[in-house]
Image (cartoon, rainbow, N blue to C red):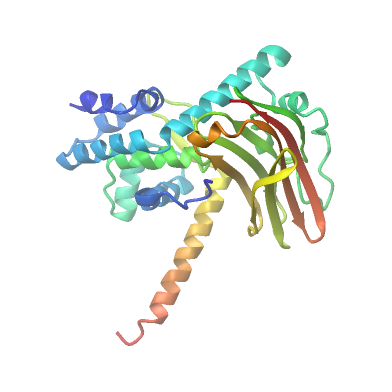
């Protein structure tokens, strides 16, 4: 069963970053790597990027768009937006809980 | 160097991604650690689900070609596909005010049974469909659902019976609005024990209102 971002193993974080980047705009591979590097300080390698893209596409969370000059942009699907929102809400709950436990440090 | 690395990827992966991957790698300065990253990607592509993904795509394309050739002649229109595979489907049902299951653009994308599997019948409700039945590796049965109302408690279940007996199923209670594909997947070795007649039923209920989609499926070997 393939739903959301569950079960992606080491590709969970790259997949989340890709979804975050695509939430802003449709982007091709290189633009994704650049945006993720600038926005989140993560230098994602091409092997990791395409591992994440393949999984996201397989799950219907992103969709390939017509290529321009051999560059193929990707866009977020409604299911991808939903999965991203759900993941962010989970992370937000973790962060809030964590910060509540750290007041005296 | 890059071309040599790319040749290590599976053929199916290269057919799908090689062009754009070359551009991505060529646009940046290939760092030493990128080489290891690509090698990791190669290993992953061999052992992970990329082949599954491509098999699904190929199956969908074959189905579309087949249906398109027989019925539509020029391309596959989702409503017509549903009409062909699902004689009882009523794609013309319009969205009534307050309806939970609205017609959706996404319903324009259902693909149906392919080699080794045959969908006999499918009753769908607007906006949701038996999404795809795939005889690739592994076998995948999937139900797509879509609900646009942002309140209430939604329950979606997915049941597969074989020769009248429960075979497998799952239940989810997603938050609203919801759009997802529920999939149940059988690994390749299992496929050869799957032959038989099946009924796939998807049920969605919210605040006492229930909709059902079903399909009869013949699984060959």
User: What residue is at 25 percent from the left and 29 percent from the top?
Assistant: B26
Residue B1, quarter of the rendered image: top left
- Residue B92 quadrant: top right
Q: Position of residue A85 (x, y in %)?
A: 52, 57
Q: In the figure, A25 relative to B25: above or below?
A: below
B141 up-or-down from B207: above or below: above
Residue positioned 35% across, 23% down in the render: B11
* Residue at the image point whose x is 35% and y is 37% from the top: B47
Q: Picture coordinates of residue B143 (x, y %)?
A: 65, 42
The quarter of the picture where the C terminus of chain B appears is top right
The image position of residue B220, as x and y in percent, is 62, 26
Q: Is residue B118 left or right of residue B121?
A: left
Q: Nearer the viewer, residue B82 or B186?
A: B186
How many numbered markers are drawn?
Answer: 0
Q: Name the spot of residue B144 as percent of width and height, x first.
A: 65, 42
Residue B21 falls left or right of residue B85: left
- Residue B19 seen in this snapshot: yes
Residue B105 at least partly seen: no
Vertical position of residue A18 compared to residue B111: above or below: below
Q: Nearer the viewer, residue B110 or B177?
A: B110
Q: Residue at x 77, y 51 (%)?
A: B100
Q: Residue furthest bottom?
A: A104
């Amino acid at each position: 069963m393939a739903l959301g971002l569950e079960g992606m193993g080491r590709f969970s974080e790259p997949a989340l970053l890709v979804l975050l980047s695509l939430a802003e705009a449709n982007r091709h591979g290189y633009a994704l790597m650049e945006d993720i590097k600038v926005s989140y300080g993560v230098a994602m390698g091409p092997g990791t990027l395409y591992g994440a893209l393949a999984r996201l596409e397989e799950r219907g969370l992103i969709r390939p768009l017509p290529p321009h000059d051999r560059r193929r942009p990707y866009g977020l699907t409604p299911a991808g937006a939903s999965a991203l929102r759900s993941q962010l809400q989970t992370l937000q709950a973790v962060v809030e809980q964590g910060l509540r436990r750290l007041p005296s440090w | 160097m890059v071309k040599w690395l790319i040749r290590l990827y599976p053929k199916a992966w290269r057919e799908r991604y090689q062009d754009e991957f070359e551009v991505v790698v060529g646009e940046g300065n290939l760092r030493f650690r990128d080489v290891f990253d690509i090698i990791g990607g190669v290993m992953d592509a061999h052992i992970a689900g990329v082949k599954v993904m491509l098999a699904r795509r190929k199956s969908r394309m074959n189905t579309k070609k087949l249906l398109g050739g027989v019925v539509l002649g020029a391309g596959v229109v989702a409503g017509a596909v549903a009409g062909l595979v699902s004689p009882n489907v009523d794609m013309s049902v319009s969205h009534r005010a307050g309806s939970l299951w609205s017609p959706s653009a996404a319903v324009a994308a259902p693909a149906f049974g392919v080699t080794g599997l045959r969908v006999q019948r499918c009753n769908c409700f607007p906006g949701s469909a038996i999404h795809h039945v795939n005889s690739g590796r592994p076998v995948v049965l999937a139900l797509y659902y879509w609900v646009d109302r942002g309140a209430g408690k939604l329950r979606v279940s997915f049941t597969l019976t074989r020769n009248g007996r429960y075979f497998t199923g799952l239940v989810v209670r997603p938050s609203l609005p919801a759009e997802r594909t529920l999939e149940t997947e059988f690994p390749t070795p299992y496929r050869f024990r799957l032959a038989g007649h099946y009924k796939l039923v998807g049920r969605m209920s919210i605040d006492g209102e229930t909709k059902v989609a079903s399909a009869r499926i013949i699984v060959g070997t």
